[in-house]
Structures are given as C-alpha cells and as structure tokens.
Image (cartoon, grey):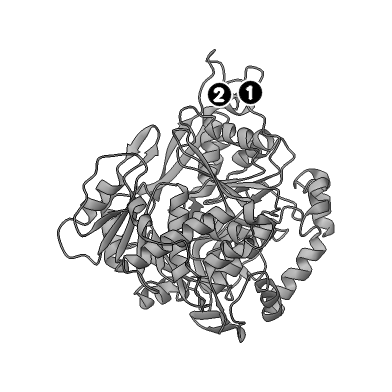
Amino acid sequence: MSEQIETHLKEGRFFAPPKEFAQRARISSMEEYRRMYRESLEEPEVFWGREAQGLDWREPWERVVEWELPDAKWFVGGRLNACENCVDRHLGTARRHKAALVWEGEPGDKRTMTYAQLYRQVCLFANVLKRNGVKAGDRVLIYMPLIPEAIVAMLACARIGAVHSVVFGGFSSESIRDRLADSGASVVVTADGGYRRGQIVTLKQNVDHALEGGETSVQRVIVFRRANLEIHIEEHRDVWWHRELEYVSAECPAEGFDSEHPLFILYTSGSTGKPKGILHTTGGYLVGTHCTSKYVFDLRDEDLYWCTADVGWITGHSYVVYGPLSCGATCMIYEGAPNWPEPDRFWRIVEEYGVTIFYTAPTAIRSFIKWGRHWVEKHDLSSLRLLGTVGEPINPEAWMWYYEVIGRKKCPIVDTWWQTETGAHMLTPLPGVTPTKPGSATLPFFGVDAAIVDEEGREVGVNEGGRLVIRRPWPSMLRGIYGDPARYREQYWSQVPGCYFTGDGARRDEDGYFWIVGRMDDVLNVAGHRLGTAEVESALVAHPAVAEAAVVGRPDEIKGQAVVAFVTLKGVCKHRQHFGRNCEGMWRK
C-alpha cells in the first residue's frame, strides 16, 4: 500500500476493508492484488490459463488468446459446456443437495431448487427444446418473469448449444418484434403472465401482438403457466411448458462446444434507435464471470448471495446465472418490486432468508433513501457481510447511506463498473483489499488495461476528464454486434485507434482511482464548460432534501446549452419537520 493511501486512510478519506473480512478473503493484501494484476497484463497466457483451470473443459485449449483488431478469440481449440459448468460439475460434490436457487414470488409463494433438482429441470426442458426443433446454433428468445424457469430455459439452451436472447419482461411487444426480426429466433419461451406491483403483466399477450401480421421466423411458442390467465393458444404454434414435459425424459447429456461457440445475444440501446445485439461466446465469457464472481464477491459455500437484477439484463446473465452458479453459489431471486406491498420488501427478504451478499443498483439505493430509513430499521440485517452496486455511477451521498444504514459500517462495498459489452466487471474494488472512496469504482480488475485519453488518443493527466478506453482484450469481451460487423468496428474500435472505446467519460485521481462521470453523449457544453450530467446530479443529491435527480441539456441562445434538472424530494416525516429521517435526525432548513 502506498504511503499516500496510508495517509488518506488516517485522514478518513478512504474506507479500509474490515480486518475480519480481510483476514479470510480470497485476496487479502494490496501487494497480492498488484502482483496478480501485473502478471495478468505482462503474462496473460499464464494468468488466464491458470484461472480457466477453475472450470471443467471437455478438451484443453491450444492457445489462450488470439488477437487481431477488432477480433479476439480466447482459449482457442478448447471445448466446454456452460450449463455443465454451472450445474453438472457440482453433482459429484457436497453441493449436490445444496440450494442453487432460493426464490420468492411477489405474491409470497416460495421455492427452493437444489443443484440436483436444477439439473433435472434443465435436462427436461432441454429435451423439450429439442422436441420442438431447436438445435445447436438456433436462436431462442426468452421473455419471462423472474422465476426459476427463466434460468432453467437459459441453461437448457446452453446445454444443447442454442443461442438464447433474453428480453426483459417489462419490455413491450414492439421490443420483442424488433429482437425477433434481428435475431431470427425460431422459438419463443414465455409465460402467461408475471407479477409486478400487485398487477399481472400479460406476457403471452405481448408475444401474440409481436407476432401479429408480417412474416416471422418463429415456429413455436412455449408457454409456462405462472399467473393462471386465460390466454390465446395458436394451434400448431403454441404449446404449454408443463404438457411438453410429459413427452420427454430427464436424460440429456451435455454437449461440448468450441470455446468461441455463441452463448447468447443480448440487446442494448443504440444511438441510432435500433437495438444492438451484443454477442457473447462461451469460454472467455464463462472464465470472466467465474473469476470475477469468485474474487469480487469473495463467494463462499455458506453464502446466500442476492443480485437483485432481472435476467433480462447483462447483470442477471453474468451475476445471477453464469458467474455465481459456476462457483456453486446459492442465489436468491425475487420476482417483484422492492416496494410491494410496502417499501421494506427487500429488507424483509434479507432478514427472513439470512442474505449475506447484496448486489443492487444506485437507482434502487436512492429509492430506499427516499422511502426513509425507518423501513430499514424495522429489520435485522446483521447477516449481511458484503454490499455491491452496479449499473451506473453511484453518488457519494448514496454510497454513504448504503454503507451506514444498510451495511451498518461493517460491510465492504464493491462499486463495480462494467457494461453489457464487457460481460464482466472491469473496474471494481476487491473487498478484502481495496480501500474504497465513496463514488469511485477504484481500480481495474485483472487483465483490464484501462486508460483515460483525449480525442486524439493521448492519455490525460491526473484528474483530467477524458474518454475511458480499454487497451487490450479481456476474456469476457463481446465478440461483435449480431449480424453487423461494420457497426461493431465503427462504434467500439474506430474512435480511439487500437482501443475499445467504452462510450463513458471518466477521470483518474492522484491515487490512480477511476471516477466514471457518465456517458460521453451525456456531457453538456455550457458556455464552453463541459459538464458531466452525473456530476451535476451528484451535486444535487448532496442536498439533504433530495432523493434523486436527473439532468439533461436544452438549447440556449447565449450559452449554447443550459442545464435542466428533474428532482425528486425525500419523503417528509409525519411531523413535517424534516426529510427522510427519524425525529432525532437532520432537520429541514
């Protein structure tokens, strides 16, 4: 640890990992992190070859990486199966009868699925897919509520080499139609409906609307009965999940696939309005998610790990399904909204089940702040040992609230920066090692050569803003935009020569810590001054009355652009004397 960091720790500018946590962490010293990080850059074949040994391979790789801008191949010649690594390999161990998934539905129904039970359900549904014509390389669109069967469907696709494309259950029929047209999926897996804030989302009806009129590649729609809705069944196209299970066996051996075999397509927003189908392959992605889950969450067999993301997002892919399950974790999943029927639903779940690791988004944290800490204080959260954030930069005030109110000042926080495109964590603290600063994603993960550069690609100085780029390949990186290699090259590899451009603006402070300031297309130019929207938003939420803020620009005749802010205030106590605190707290000014 540098003398400067030690000084800052003494001054209270950093939060050091708790000693008890660090003593048993997988990585427990800054010296160890630096040694491993240096090796990951200087000898990537050695480092990643060793980390990849943590997975089961059908055939060993010949070369760890091949790289020719903008294309990369990892673990060339190796063969493996992602489903086998998430399920089968645990069956010959003490994890066979360990809970893989602990699920709660929004209405309050509950289920636990062991690794042995998950294996059986995945094999059954893989055979259902095959019975309905799905083979390796075919695309399957999954549009489900957050129930165990959504994960079963993903793993079943991986088992037989089909390429899944999961669509978030909150998206519209138009979103489904666009993704079907782009991916050419032959099968849709959906449910009659799902629960959200006490209402039923009519998923099957949305699929029907998406398939109305025009030509479609869809040959089959498989429907899981979740909400007991009366739905339309199109003859010769629609089949019930539970009835299909009657015709198949639970014997479905996993197939080995090339390391670069496509695993999934996940669509993300594009500047042109057309969604981009981000393509991830099998070997490198699985190594990246396995490695980050192990080190960043410091996963243990006794943990109950809860990532609150839906599997319709990359966070759900990497840190609900593939990363944690490949590590043999027990994963908590919850179907509904955090404030249904009351704003303490998450904290009731943490207390009831004994959640130890909690990973959520800054937007959710700011909502918790708005609802008030009294909802938290009703519950015993002493089981928590690690907290995490994901999805966007977290403002320092929300970080401190999370640390003090949820973590009770004893839980490290891993503030992770990464993207759909990167597949896995890129900038993150290691919980037993890294002194943290509220609002900073801190340091690069192993193998991540991150830099901040100007428009000409020159690295900028300390605390100078610029473009965040990655200067060399990493295992979990995207392999392209599905069906559009020109767009892939143009969007990610042409703006800064020889580098992957993240699209984010950032700065690096005097300790080498990275601070994400928002998307480059979210930077406002006000009277010649470049203002990151995230920084303005952070200043607004620093006010004790503000729970959340969003900032946009509008044209201004004098300044070029002006700042427009949308602000949500915290709830006022029943005495109407202060915001979001108990009566002994901060008073309204």
At label 2, which amino acid type do we have? Phe
Measuring from the top left, give residue 153's x and y in whole percent: 43, 58
Using the image, determine if residue 344 lies above or below residue 49.
Answer: above
Give the SS element for disc 2. loop
Query: Dot 1 surroundings within 10 Å: few (below 14), some, or many (20 or more)?
Result: some
Check disc 2 and report the residue beneath it.
579
Q: Is 567 on the left-hand or right-hand side of 213?
A: right
Residues at marks 1 and 2 touching, judged by CB atoms closer than 8 Å = yes
At label 1, which amino acid type do we have? Met
C-alpha separation, residue under disc 1 versus residue under disc 2? 7 Å
Check disc 1 and report the residue beneath it.
586
Measuring from the top left, give residue 392's x and y in whole percent: 52, 51
Query: Dot 2 surroundings within 10 Å: few (below 14), some, or many (20 or more)?
Result: many
Measuring from the top left, give residue 115's x and y in whole percent: 58, 55
Looking at the rendered image, the quarter that the C terminus falls into is: top right
Residue at 35% over, 69% down: 134
Using the image, determine if residue 208 lies above or below residue 230.
Answer: below
Whether residue 230 is visible to the viewer of this picture, yes or no, is yes
Taking the view exactly as shown, the residue that stands out farthest to the bottom is 62
